[in-house]
Image (cartoon, rainbow, N blue to C red):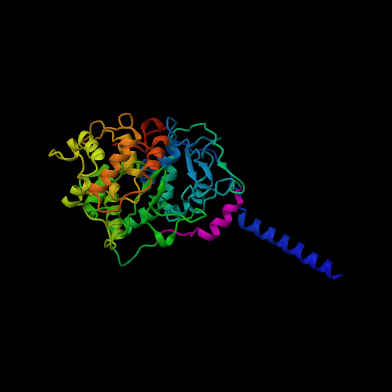
Amino acid sequence: MSKPAIVGSVVIAALVGGAIAAFAVAWRPAIGAIEPPASRSFDPALVKRGRDLAAIGNCNDCHTAPGGKAFAGGVPVPTPFGAVYSSNITPDPETGIGRWSEAAFRRAMRSGVDRAGHHLYPTFPYDHFTNVTDEDDQALYAFLMTRSPVRASDHPNDLSFPFNQRFLIAGWKLLFLKKGTYKADSSQSAEWNRGAYLVDGLAHCGACHTPRNGLGAEEASASFSGADVDNWHAYAINAQSRSPLPWTKDSLFHYLRYGWDADHGTARGPMAKVAANLSSVPESDVRAIAFYMTSVFGTPAPGRPGPANDKSAQAAAGDQAGASIYQAACASCHESDRPLPYSGIDLRLSTALSAPDPRNAANVILSGIRPVSGERSPIMPGFANNMTDDQLVALLKYLRSRFSTQPAWSGIEQTVRNARQTETVSLQTSPGTVSAPGSTQRDKP
């Protein structure tokens, strides 16, 4: 055989071998369909536990489109590669998960592979859900399979080539997916371990609060250091926190449970929905999350911002335009002697005003904070229709100068324009069983 022929044969063999290896890595078998189980076949206590777990996991928020049926999917999740739409997880046999066995459901949670063997995009945070125990997966399955089935076909994803090729996700998993349920730390208390299990697993807090690398995976070395989510900044919730006042387990519990805390303000944007769901789960789980996260916050990093003092207020007084707007629109509440939540937070304690950029502050000023019917909850009017862009820019500059010890923000004008153009996430916190509305149950457990 000639040398060129030998070289050609080697190249062909390498290509074929590579193709076989890639297929072996990417291929997953389908799991057989089942007849949709009767709602009454599930233990009511198991369904109830699954309902609480679904609330902790915020399943309703990602799988319920605005104005759509609960858990029927269709919510766009923006990524640097395009939009990925959430799927229908109601027990509809044709368009949902009605024909999924519990084993198929567990594989999706644990490995990010659907019943048909397709790799799921990691916008479904199975890199966290792989830590969920079999018992909790069983409870989640029971809860979802007792919802009302909704016929709603999946919305096609809006991804450019090659990111629309699902087999590439297998390579992503080889790099970034660490399988295995949570392993308890014997040196820590039961409450700490419960909190760690929920935070790193079902609650997937790092999915929003950890920055991502160029391939969309969380940066392990920067866990909980803050990230961008839906035109909001998810604050750092570790020692890098910009909160002027350190979080305690009690203040964090109150914030997570009720959506606000006197020393830290109100849950806003996507975090408002998290707090709404946590308002309806067992209190012990919320306290465990707060206990664990307080240990993650740890000792504040050097250079952490502290509350502004009177000297900074005097320095800000030179900004007459911003000062005048503040006096007219903000001071009557934020300098009131009324008790919270009917007065505004002491702005010297505002994390939004000490944040790396003015996005969250701009969003809150434009949209306001809606009251919750029947609850003693924070309220703030929105000023989208009452302030021009120039006025909002002046106000933000003044607030940053007076109520923060951090340097002036840059790019405020563009931030304000972006905030105007982007539909911000609801700021309302809501009581009750948000993740399990009675109207979506086939049979109440």
325 sits left or right of 58 in the view: left
Labels in figure, total = 0
212 sits left or right of 249 in the view: right
**Foreground pick, 133 / 12:** 12
**Foreground pick, 157 / 310:** 310
Q: Residue furthest right?
A: 1
Q: Residue at x 29, y 35 (%)?
A: 368
Q: Residue at x 54, y 50 (%)?
A: 113
Q: Range of the magenta residues?
A: 165-182
Tell me where residue 55 appears, x and y as whole percent: 36, 43
Tell me where residue 240 appears, x and y as whole percent: 32, 58
Quadrant of image for the C terminus: top left
147 sits left or right of 24 in the view: left
Q: Is residue 170 magenta?
A: yes
Q: Quadrant of residue 191?
A: bottom left
Q: Quadrant of residue 267?
A: top left
Tell me where residue 354 appears, x and y as whole percent: 29, 50
**Foreground pick, 312 / 437:** 312
